[in-house]
Image (cartoon, rainbow, N blue to C red):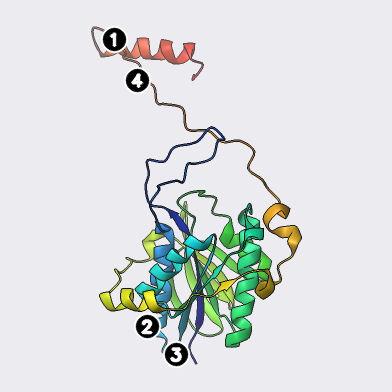
C-alpha cells in the first residue's frame, strides 16, 4: 500500500545581509527567497522513504503568502508528488501556533482524501525566525506522537517507525506509533539537486490554494487571533573592535587581563 507522507516547508530569505527598518521589522523588499535550507533535508528524507516503500506518496504543504508557492514548486522539482499552499489574507499576522493549527487542518484534509497520512516531516527550524516551534506544536494540534532533532529513520512501515534522536549526551532510539510528526536535522542525509525533468514538471503542476473555506480553521488561533504578536525588533548591536591587552610578557598580560575582567564584572 505504501506510505502517505506530508512535508511541511517554508519560503525564507536566501540572503544573509538583511536589514531592519524603522518599525523594527526585517526589510523584505528586493530580497531573494528560496526553500528553507532545513526543509531540504525533510524533503530528501521523504523521497528516500518513498523510494524504499513502493506505492508511497509525498505531499508538500506550505503556509504563507502567494509567493510561498515557490517553496512548494521547488519541492515538486525535487520529486514530491503534489503540493498545496495554505494562503489567505485572514491568516496574516500568525505565529508558530497559528501556522501549526493551519497545517493540522490541511493535513487532516489530505488524510481524508488519501485515507490516511502516515508521517509528517519538517525541518528542525526555519532560517528566518528560528523558533523550532512549528513541528512540536503541529504534533500537539494533531494529537499525534512527535519527535524533534531526528538524525536517522532506520525503520518504518505503515504502523510504526524507529527513529534516532540526537541528544547532547548521545543518541536516543525511539519507536513511534504512526501517524507521527518528526522534525529532522541536517545530519540525516544529503539533499539531492532537482533534475531538468523535475523542474519542467514543477512549473506545470497544479498547486491548489486552501483558505478558510477549505480548511475551516478556528479564528481564535489564526491571524489577528494568534496567541503572540510582534512587539519590538531591532538590528544586532555592531560588534566592537575589541580590547588589546598589553604587557612585556605573558605573566604581565595575564595579570592585566584578569584585572580588566574584574573591572567588567566578568569574574
Label pair 4/1, CB-CB below 8 angstroms: no
In primary-sequence order, the first of circles 1 and 3 is: 3
Of residues 115 and 218, the one drawn nearer to the viewer in this rendering? 218
Q: How crowded is mark 1: few (under 14 residues within 10 Å), some or many (20 or more)?
A: few
Q: Mark 2 highlights which residue? A: 51
User: Picture coordinates of residue 96 (x, y %)?
Assistant: 61, 55
Secondary structure of residue under mark 2: helix
Question: Mark 2 and mark 4: span between their CA atoms?
Answer: 52 Å
In primary-sequence order, the first of circles 1 and 2 is: 2
Q: Is residue 227 left or right of residue 234?
A: right
Q: Residues within 10 Å of mark 4 (few under 14, many from 20)?
A: few
User: Picture coordinates of residue 22 (x, y %)?
Assistant: 53, 32
Question: Mark 1 and mark 2: span between their CA atoms?
Answer: 62 Å
On residue 241, the disc is 4
Label pair 2/3, CB-CB below 8 angstroms: no
Question: Mark 3 and mark 4: span between their CA atoms?
Answer: 59 Å
| View extreme (top): residue | 248
Of residues 55 and 91, the one drawn nearer to the viewer in this rendering? 91
* Residue ID at (36%, 73%): 77
Q: Mark 3 highlights which residue? A: 55
Label pair 1/2, CB-CB below 8 angstroms: no
Q: Mark 1 highlights which residue? A: 246
In primary-sequence order, the first of circles 2 and 4 is: 2
* Residue ID at (39%, 68%): 74
Secondary structure of residue under mark 1: loop
In primary-sequence order, the first of circles 3 and 4 is: 3
Amino acid at each position: 500500500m505504501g506510505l502517505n507522507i506530508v512535508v511541511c516547508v517554508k519560503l525564507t530569505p536566501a540572503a544573509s545581509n538583511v536589514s531592519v527598518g524603522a518599525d523594527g521589522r526585517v526589510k523584505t523588499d528586493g530580497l531573494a527567497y528560496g526553500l528553507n535550507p532545513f526543509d531540504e533535508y525533510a524533503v530528501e528524507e521523504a523521497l528516500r522513504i518513498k523510494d524504499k516503500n513502493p506505492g508511497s506518496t509525498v505531499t508538500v504543504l506550505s503556509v504563507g503568502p502567494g509567493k510561498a508557492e515557490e517553496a512548494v514548486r521547488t519541492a515538486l522539482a525535487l520529486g514530491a508528488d503534489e503540493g498545496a499552499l495554505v494562503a489567505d489574507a485572514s491568516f496574516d499576522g500568525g505565529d508558530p501556533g497559528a501556522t501549526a493549527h493551519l497545517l493540522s487542518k490541511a493535513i487532516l484534509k489530505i488524510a481524508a482524501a488519501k485515507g490516511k497520512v502516515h508521517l509528517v516531516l519538517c525541518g528542525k527550524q526555519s532560517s528566518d525566525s528560528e523558533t523550532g516551534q512549528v513541528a512540536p506544536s503541529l504534533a500537539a494540534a494533531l494529537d499525534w506522537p512527535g519527535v524533534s532533532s531526528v538524525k536517522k529513520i532506520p525503520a518504518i512501515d505503515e504502523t510504526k517507525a524507529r527513529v534516532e534522536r540526537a541528544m547532547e549526551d548521545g543518541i536516543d532510539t525511539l519507536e513511534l506509533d504512526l501517524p507521527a510528526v518528526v522534525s529532522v536535522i541536517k545530519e540525516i542525509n544529503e539533499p539531492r539537486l532537482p533534475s531538468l525533468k523535475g523542474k519542467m514538471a514543477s512549473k506545470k503542476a497544479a498547486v491548489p490554494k486552501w483558505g478558510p473555506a477549505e480548511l475551516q480553521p478556528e479564528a481564535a488561533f489564526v491571524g489577528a487571533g494568534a496567541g503572540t504578536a510582534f512587539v519590538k525588533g531591532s538590528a544586532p548591536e555592531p560588534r566592537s573592535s575589541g580590547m588589546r591587552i598589553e604587557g612585556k610578557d605573558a605573566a604581565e598580560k595575564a595579570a592585566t587581563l584578569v584585572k580588566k575582567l574584574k573591572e567588567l564584572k566578568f569574574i
